[in-house]
Image: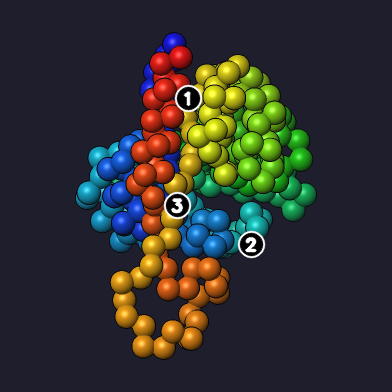
Protein backbone atom coordinates (compact mmCIF):
# COMPACT_ATOMS: atom_id res chain seq x y z
CA UNK A 1 0.00 0.00 0.00
CA UNK A 2 1.22 3.53 -0.79
CA UNK A 3 2.67 5.40 2.18
CA UNK A 4 0.59 8.51 1.54
CA UNK A 5 -1.62 10.45 -0.80
CA UNK A 6 -0.17 11.12 -4.24
CA UNK A 7 -0.02 14.87 -4.78
CA UNK A 8 -1.80 16.07 -7.92
CA UNK A 9 -0.36 19.29 -9.36
CA UNK A 10 -2.06 21.03 -12.28
CA UNK A 11 -0.75 23.93 -14.38
CA UNK A 12 -3.34 26.70 -14.73
CA UNK A 13 -3.42 30.00 -16.59
CA UNK A 14 -6.66 31.65 -15.44
CA UNK A 15 -8.73 32.27 -12.34
CA UNK A 16 -11.49 30.05 -13.75
CA UNK A 17 -9.11 27.16 -14.34
CA UNK A 18 -7.54 27.49 -10.89
CA UNK A 19 -10.86 27.41 -9.06
CA UNK A 20 -12.22 24.50 -11.12
CA UNK A 21 -9.03 22.50 -10.68
CA UNK A 22 -9.04 22.83 -6.90
CA UNK A 23 -12.78 22.18 -6.61
CA UNK A 24 -12.36 18.89 -8.46
CA UNK A 25 -9.39 17.38 -6.68
CA UNK A 26 -6.10 19.15 -7.45
CA UNK A 27 -3.70 19.43 -4.50
CA UNK A 28 -1.34 22.09 -5.83
CA UNK A 29 -1.43 24.65 -8.63
CA UNK A 30 1.37 25.70 -10.95
CA UNK A 31 0.34 29.19 -12.00
CA UNK A 32 1.57 30.34 -15.41
CA UNK A 33 0.91 32.79 -18.20
CA UNK A 34 1.18 32.28 -21.97
CA UNK A 35 0.02 28.76 -22.74
CA UNK A 36 1.37 28.96 -26.30
CA UNK A 37 4.94 29.45 -25.02
CA UNK A 38 4.69 26.57 -22.57
CA UNK A 39 4.32 28.91 -19.61
CA UNK A 40 5.82 32.23 -18.52
CA UNK A 41 5.59 34.37 -15.39
CA UNK A 42 1.99 35.28 -14.44
CA UNK A 43 0.89 38.61 -13.00
CA UNK A 44 0.92 39.41 -9.31
CA UNK A 45 -2.72 40.42 -9.59
CA UNK A 46 -3.71 37.00 -10.91
CA UNK A 47 -1.83 35.27 -8.09
CA UNK A 48 -3.35 37.54 -5.44
CA UNK A 49 -6.93 36.84 -6.54
CA UNK A 50 -6.38 33.08 -6.77
CA UNK A 51 -4.78 32.97 -3.32
CA UNK A 52 -7.88 34.64 -1.92
CA UNK A 53 -10.05 31.77 -3.14
CA UNK A 54 -8.02 28.56 -2.79
CA UNK A 55 -6.46 26.84 0.19
CA UNK A 56 -3.96 24.66 -1.72
CA UNK A 57 -0.35 25.73 -2.38
CA UNK A 58 0.26 27.82 -5.48
CA UNK A 59 3.68 27.47 -7.12
CA UNK A 60 4.48 30.20 -9.64
CA UNK A 61 6.31 29.87 -12.94
CA UNK A 62 9.31 32.18 -13.19
CA UNK A 63 10.18 32.57 -16.85
CA UNK A 64 10.49 36.06 -18.27
CA UNK A 65 9.94 34.95 -21.88
CA UNK A 66 9.55 31.94 -24.09
CA UNK A 67 11.90 30.69 -26.77
CA UNK A 68 14.66 29.06 -24.73
CA UNK A 69 16.13 28.85 -21.23
CA UNK A 70 19.32 30.86 -21.78
CA UNK A 71 18.96 34.21 -20.03
CA UNK A 72 21.00 37.40 -19.92
CA UNK A 73 22.01 39.03 -16.64
CA UNK A 74 19.26 41.62 -17.05
CA UNK A 75 16.66 38.89 -17.66
CA UNK A 76 17.80 37.09 -14.52
CA UNK A 77 17.46 40.37 -12.65
CA UNK A 78 13.88 40.68 -13.91
CA UNK A 79 13.16 37.12 -12.77
CA UNK A 80 14.59 37.88 -9.32
CA UNK A 81 12.33 40.93 -9.09
CA UNK A 82 9.32 38.85 -10.13
CA UNK A 83 10.10 36.33 -7.41
CA UNK A 84 10.29 39.07 -4.81
CA UNK A 85 6.96 40.60 -5.89
CA UNK A 86 5.14 37.28 -6.29
CA UNK A 87 6.53 36.04 -2.99
CA UNK A 88 5.01 39.06 -1.29
CA UNK A 89 1.66 38.21 -2.89
CA UNK A 90 1.55 34.67 -1.54
CA UNK A 91 3.52 32.40 -3.88
CA UNK A 92 4.12 29.17 -1.97
CA UNK A 93 6.94 28.03 -4.25
CA UNK A 94 8.58 28.74 -7.59
CA UNK A 95 9.11 26.83 -10.85
CA UNK A 96 12.04 27.72 -13.11
CA UNK A 97 15.00 26.36 -15.03
CA UNK A 98 18.11 27.95 -16.51
CA UNK A 99 20.44 26.31 -19.03
CA UNK A 100 23.80 27.21 -20.51
CA UNK A 101 24.40 27.73 -24.22
CA UNK A 102 25.45 24.06 -24.43
CA UNK A 103 22.21 22.91 -22.81
CA UNK A 104 23.56 22.03 -19.37
CA UNK A 105 22.12 23.20 -16.05
CA UNK A 106 23.39 26.73 -15.34
CA UNK A 107 24.31 26.23 -11.69
CA UNK A 108 25.40 29.82 -11.12
CA UNK A 109 22.19 31.33 -12.48
CA UNK A 110 20.07 28.78 -10.61
CA UNK A 111 21.83 29.68 -7.37
CA UNK A 112 20.91 33.32 -7.91
CA UNK A 113 17.23 32.44 -8.34
CA UNK A 114 17.21 29.94 -5.47
CA UNK A 115 18.52 32.69 -3.21
CA UNK A 116 15.72 34.96 -4.44
CA UNK A 117 13.20 32.25 -3.45
CA UNK A 118 14.09 32.94 0.21
CA UNK A 119 13.69 29.33 1.29
CA UNK A 120 10.45 28.59 -0.58
CA UNK A 121 10.49 25.23 -2.42
CA UNK A 122 11.63 25.33 -6.03
CA UNK A 123 10.93 23.00 -8.94
CA UNK A 124 13.28 22.73 -11.92
CA UNK A 125 10.87 22.65 -14.85
CA UNK A 126 10.93 20.87 -18.20
CA UNK A 127 14.03 22.70 -19.34
CA UNK A 128 15.45 19.54 -17.78
CA UNK A 129 14.14 17.56 -20.76
CA UNK A 130 16.61 19.38 -23.04
CA UNK A 131 19.66 18.49 -20.94
CA UNK A 132 21.78 15.78 -22.63
CA UNK A 133 23.06 14.07 -19.45
CA UNK A 134 20.02 13.85 -17.20
CA UNK A 135 21.61 11.78 -14.45
CA UNK A 136 24.43 14.30 -14.08
CA UNK A 137 21.86 17.12 -14.10
CA UNK A 138 19.86 15.38 -11.38
CA UNK A 139 22.92 15.33 -9.11
CA UNK A 140 23.55 19.02 -9.75
CA UNK A 141 19.95 19.92 -8.94
CA UNK A 142 20.08 17.89 -5.72
CA UNK A 143 23.26 19.70 -4.67
CA UNK A 144 21.73 23.09 -5.46
CA UNK A 145 18.70 22.44 -3.27
CA UNK A 146 15.82 22.03 -5.73
CA UNK A 147 12.92 20.05 -4.23
CA UNK A 148 11.64 18.45 -7.43
CA UNK A 149 12.22 18.01 -11.16
CA UNK A 150 9.32 18.24 -13.61
CA UNK A 151 10.10 15.95 -16.54
CA UNK A 152 8.66 13.87 -19.35
CA UNK A 153 11.88 11.90 -19.49
CA UNK A 154 13.21 13.97 -22.36
CA UNK A 155 10.42 12.82 -24.68
CA UNK A 156 7.32 14.47 -26.13
CA UNK A 157 5.20 12.89 -23.41
CA UNK A 158 5.50 10.78 -20.28
CA UNK A 159 4.52 7.53 -22.02
CA UNK A 160 7.42 7.87 -24.45
CA UNK A 161 9.87 8.91 -21.73
CA UNK A 162 8.74 6.48 -19.04
CA UNK A 163 11.93 4.41 -19.03
CA UNK A 164 14.04 7.49 -18.35
CA UNK A 165 11.62 8.73 -15.69
CA UNK A 166 11.86 5.41 -13.86
CA UNK A 167 15.67 5.47 -13.98
CA UNK A 168 15.68 9.02 -12.62
CA UNK A 169 13.31 8.09 -9.79
CA UNK A 170 15.57 5.20 -8.81
CA UNK A 171 18.67 7.39 -8.90
CA UNK A 172 16.95 10.15 -6.93
CA UNK A 173 16.40 7.68 -4.06
CA UNK A 174 14.26 10.12 -2.12
CA UNK A 175 16.76 12.99 -2.35
CA UNK A 176 14.62 14.92 -4.82
CA UNK A 177 11.10 14.35 -6.12
CA UNK A 178 10.77 13.27 -9.75
CA UNK A 179 7.53 14.87 -10.91
CA UNK A 180 6.24 13.18 -14.11
CA UNK A 181 4.52 15.67 -16.39
CA UNK A 182 4.02 16.47 -20.04
CA UNK A 183 1.15 14.68 -21.74
CA UNK A 184 0.63 12.51 -18.65
CA UNK A 185 -2.56 10.41 -18.77
CA UNK A 186 -4.26 8.19 -16.23
CA UNK A 187 -3.23 5.18 -18.33
CA UNK A 188 0.43 5.98 -17.53
CA UNK A 189 -0.07 5.97 -13.77
CA UNK A 190 0.00 2.22 -12.96
CA UNK A 191 3.20 1.73 -14.99
CA UNK A 192 4.89 4.69 -13.31
CA UNK A 193 3.82 3.44 -9.89
CA UNK A 194 5.22 -0.09 -10.25
CA UNK A 195 8.88 0.13 -9.24
CA UNK A 196 9.11 3.45 -7.38
CA UNK A 197 5.77 4.50 -5.87
CA UNK A 198 4.66 7.88 -7.13
CA UNK A 199 4.85 10.83 -4.76
CA UNK A 200 3.55 13.58 -7.04
CA UNK A 201 2.26 13.98 -10.59
CA UNK A 202 1.66 16.90 -12.94
CA UNK A 203 -1.28 16.95 -15.37
CA UNK A 204 -3.34 19.80 -16.77
CA UNK A 205 -6.78 18.46 -17.64
CA UNK A 206 -6.91 21.47 -19.93
CA UNK A 207 -9.86 22.33 -22.11
CA UNK A 208 -11.03 25.21 -24.27
CA UNK A 209 -14.54 26.56 -23.93
CA UNK A 210 -16.33 28.79 -26.39
CA UNK A 211 -16.42 32.46 -25.49
CA UNK A 212 -19.72 33.85 -24.23
CA UNK A 213 -18.89 37.17 -25.89
CA UNK A 214 -20.76 38.11 -29.04
CA UNK A 215 -18.45 38.70 -31.98
CA UNK A 216 -19.61 41.27 -34.50
CA UNK A 217 -16.93 40.23 -36.99
CA UNK A 218 -16.24 36.50 -36.87
CA UNK A 219 -13.57 36.72 -39.59
CA UNK A 220 -11.21 38.95 -37.61
CA UNK A 221 -8.48 36.96 -35.89
CA UNK A 222 -6.69 38.27 -32.80
CA UNK A 223 -5.01 35.05 -31.67
CA UNK A 224 -1.81 33.75 -33.23
CA UNK A 225 -3.12 30.21 -32.73
CA UNK A 226 -6.12 29.52 -34.95
CA UNK A 227 -7.38 26.71 -32.69
CA UNK A 228 -7.73 29.09 -29.72
CA UNK A 229 -9.47 31.94 -31.55
CA UNK A 230 -12.76 32.74 -29.81
CA UNK A 231 -12.04 30.21 -27.05
CA UNK A 232 -11.08 30.48 -23.38
CA UNK A 233 -8.45 28.20 -21.83
CA UNK A 234 -9.75 26.43 -18.74
CA UNK A 235 -9.83 22.88 -17.33
CA UNK A 236 -12.29 20.04 -17.82
CA UNK A 237 -13.75 19.19 -14.37
CA UNK A 238 -14.60 15.67 -15.50
CA UNK A 239 -11.02 15.00 -16.61
CA UNK A 240 -9.68 16.37 -13.32
CA UNK A 241 -12.04 14.18 -11.27
CA UNK A 242 -11.20 11.09 -13.33
CA UNK A 243 -7.48 11.68 -12.88
CA UNK A 244 -7.94 12.20 -9.15
CA UNK A 245 -9.89 8.94 -8.93
CA UNK A 246 -7.12 7.09 -10.78
CA UNK A 247 -4.56 8.45 -8.30
CA UNK A 248 -6.72 7.47 -5.34
CA UNK A 249 -6.90 3.92 -6.67
CA UNK A 250 -3.11 3.78 -6.72
CA UNK A 251 -3.08 4.88 -3.09
CA UNK A 252 -4.83 1.62 -2.22
CA UNK A 253 -2.19 -0.57 -3.87
> Where residue 40 sits: x, y (%)?
50, 58
Which dot, 2 or 3, sits closer to the camera? Answer: 3
| Residue occupying the point 43% across, 55% down | 207
Marks 2 & 1, CB-CB < 8 Å contact:
no
Q: Which residue is mark 1?
A: 199
Gap between marks 1 and 3, in whole Å? Answer: 22 Å
| Residue occupying the point 48% across, 80% down | 222
Q: Which residue is mark 3?
A: 206
| Helix, strand or loop at mark 2 | loop
* Residue 140 at least partly seen: no
Residue 120: image quadrant is top left
Pick whichever of labels 2 and 1 is earlier in the sequence.
2
Marks 2 & 3, CB-CB < 8 Å contact:
no
- Left or right, residue 37 beside residue 104: left
Task: Check disc 1: other Cα within 10 Å, few if <14, some if 14-19, many if 20+.
Answer: some
| Helix, strand or loop at mark 1 | loop
The furthest residue to the top: 1
Amino acid sequence: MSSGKIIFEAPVYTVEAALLAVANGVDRLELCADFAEGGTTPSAGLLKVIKQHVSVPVFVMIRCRGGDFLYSDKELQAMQNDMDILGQHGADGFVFGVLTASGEVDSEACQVLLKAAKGKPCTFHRAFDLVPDKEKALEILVSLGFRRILTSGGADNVAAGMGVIKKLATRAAGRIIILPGGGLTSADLPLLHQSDPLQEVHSSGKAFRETAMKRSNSTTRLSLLEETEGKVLTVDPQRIRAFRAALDQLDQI
